[in-house]
Amino acid sequence: MEMTTHGAPQSNGEMEEGNSMIEGRVQSMLHDCGISMMYWVFAVTEVVYFMNYCTLHPVVSKTSYNVWRVSKPFWIHLHLFGWLAFVHVPNEK
């Protein structure tokens, strides 16, 4: 376990490395899609979700999803970030 100084998050190397990895992936997604930084929060949510869903767990050599559940993950709900979407707004009567 790595000890850190109270009130100095810069000294926490593992978390800083993880945060910079997430930030790099988010910037890459936003730049690749041509989306403004206004959607940064949504990109962070997707990156963290995908990392939890797909990253291999180092101890048991499984994804986090497989560690939490016994079943195989479903991939059908994953789409490209920045994909064009339409919203159906029903007519009010």
Image (tube, rainbow, N blue to C red):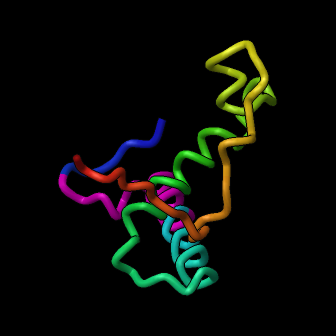
On the picture, is 7 further left or further right than 16? Answer: left
- Work out whether residue 11 or residue 21 is closer to the camera in this orientation and state it: 21
Q: Which residues are magenta?
A: 7-21
Q: Secondary structure of the magenta portion, mostly?
A: helix
Rendered image quadrant of residue 16:
bottom left
Q: Is residue 34 above or below residue 21?
A: below
- Work out whether residue 85 or residue 88 is closer to the camera in this orientation and state it: 88
**Location of residue 32 in the rendering, given as x and y in whole percent from the top left corner:** 63, 82
Residue at the image point whose x is 59% and y is 73% from the top: 29
Outermost residue toward the front in this view: 93
Q: Is residue 56 above or below residue 22?
A: above
- Work out whether residue 73 or residue 63 is closer to the camera in this orientation and state it: 73
Residue at the image point whose x is 48% and y is 64% from the top: 43
**Location of residue 72 in the rendering, given as x and y in whole percent from the top left corner:** 78, 23
Outermost residue toward the left in this view: 7
Outermost residue toward the top in this view: 70
**Location of residue 62 in the rendering, given as x and y in whole percent from the top left corner:** 78, 29
Q: Is residue 93 magenta?
A: no
- Work out whether residue 13 or residue 20 is closer to the camera in this orientation and state it: 20
On the picture, is 33 further left or further right than 38? Answer: right
Q: Report the label total.
A: 0
Residue at the image point whose x is 66% and y is 28% from the top: 65
Q: Is residue 12 magenta?
A: yes
**Location of residue 68 in the rendering, given as x and y in whole percent from the top left corner:** 62, 19
Residue at the image point whose x is 68% and y is 21% from the top: 67
On the picture, is 29 further left or further right than 60? Answer: left
